[in-house]
Amino acid sequence: MSIVVGLLVGSAAGLLAGILGLGGGVLIPPLLSLLLGLDQHAAQAASLAALLPPVGYPALAGYRKHGVKIPWRLVSWLVASFALGGALGGAVAQFIPARPLRWAFTAVLLGVALRTVFLARRPPLDDGAESGARTGFFPAAAIGGLGGAVSGLFGIGGGVIILPLLQRWARLDRLTAQVTTLAMMLFPIGLPAVAVYALANPPPWTLLVAVASGFVLGAWVGGRVAPRVPHALAGYLFAAVTVFAAVMMMLKG
C-alpha cells in the first residue's frame, strides 16, 4: 500500500514541479504525513532523499524543447549556497519537536502563498528576457542559502522559497526562474540535509524509491505543459498548492 501511495504522491509532486518549477517537496512531506501517518521528521527525510537523484530532468527537457535557456552560472552558485544552507537547516531541525516544526512549516507556506498572489497580479516580464536580471554571486548566494536553510529545516525542497525570490530579487522572468530551479535538481543539493536526517532516523528507502519513480513520470508531463500556462494562472496555482499543503499541516495538528 505504501508503495502505491508513494507512486501517486510522487506523480502529483512531479507534475506540479514540471508546471511550476517547484522541487516537489512542498507536497511530498504533508501528503506522506497525512496519508501514511509518518511523523514530520520521517516525512521530511523521505522527501529530501527521494529528490536526490536527477528526477527533474524530464521536466527540464520539456522547457529546453520550447527554447527556454538555462543560466548555468547562476545555477552553480545557487547549488553551492543551497547545500550549505541545507546542512545548517537539517541540523537545527533535529532540536525542534515535531509539532512546533509542523506549525512553523504551515506559517512559511501561508506566507509564500500570500507573496505569490501579490506577484501574480503584477505584469509579467517577457519570457526569456534578460534585461534587468541580477544573476551575480551575491544575489545567488543569498537566495540559495535561504532556500537551502528552509529546505533542511522543513523538508520542502527549497523551490517554494527560491522560485519567488528568483523572480523578485534576481528579476528573472517566470519560465527562466522555473527552469533555473529545475536545473538545480540535477545536482544532489539536498545530500547534506539528508545525511543529517539519516543519522538521526533512517528514511523508509522502499517508499522513497516509489516517490522518486512517480516524480519522474509527473515531471515529464508537467515540463511539456508549463510553457503553455499563463503567468497569472501559474501564480495562482502556485499559491493554491502552498495553501493546500498548509491546510494539510493544520489538519495534522
Image (cartoon, rainbow, N blue to C red):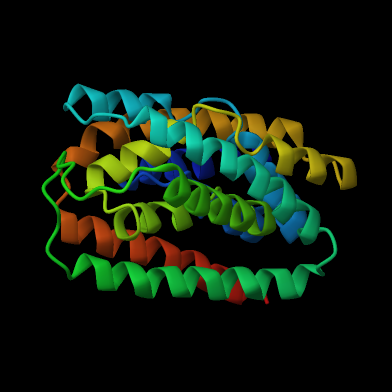
Image: 62 above or below 11: above
User: Which residue ends up furthest to the right in the rendered image?
Assistant: 200
Q: Position of residue 25 (x, y in %)?
A: 54, 49
Point 40% across, 61% down: residue: 241
Left or right of 211: which side holds 77?
A: left
Position in image of residue 35 (x %, y %): 62, 56
Counting from the top left corner in percent of width and height, residue 43 is at 69, 51
Q: Is residue 99 left or right of residue 172?
A: right
* Quadrant for the C terminus in the image: bottom right
| Picture residue at 15% right of the left edge, 43% below the top | 127
Q: Compare residues 235 and 5 and report the one nearer the observer.
A: 235
Instruction: Give 50 or 218, whichever is nearer the viewer.
Output: 50
Residue 8 seen: yes
Query: How many numbered discs sit on the rendered protein?
Result: 0
From this view, report whether residue 29 is shown above or below residue 11: below
Q: Split into 4 quadrants, where in the image is the N terminus?
A: top right
Query: Horizontal and vertical percent for residue 189?
Result: 60, 35
Q: On the image, which quarter does residue 47 sit in?
A: top right
| 245 or 158, nearer to the observer | 158
Q: Residue at x 17, y 26 (%)?
A: 67
Q: Quadrant of residue 105?
A: bottom right
Q: Viewed as shown, does residue 97 lie left or right of 215?
A: right
Instruction: Work out whether residue 156 can be spotted.
Output: no
Q: Is residue 24 left or right of residue 190?
A: left
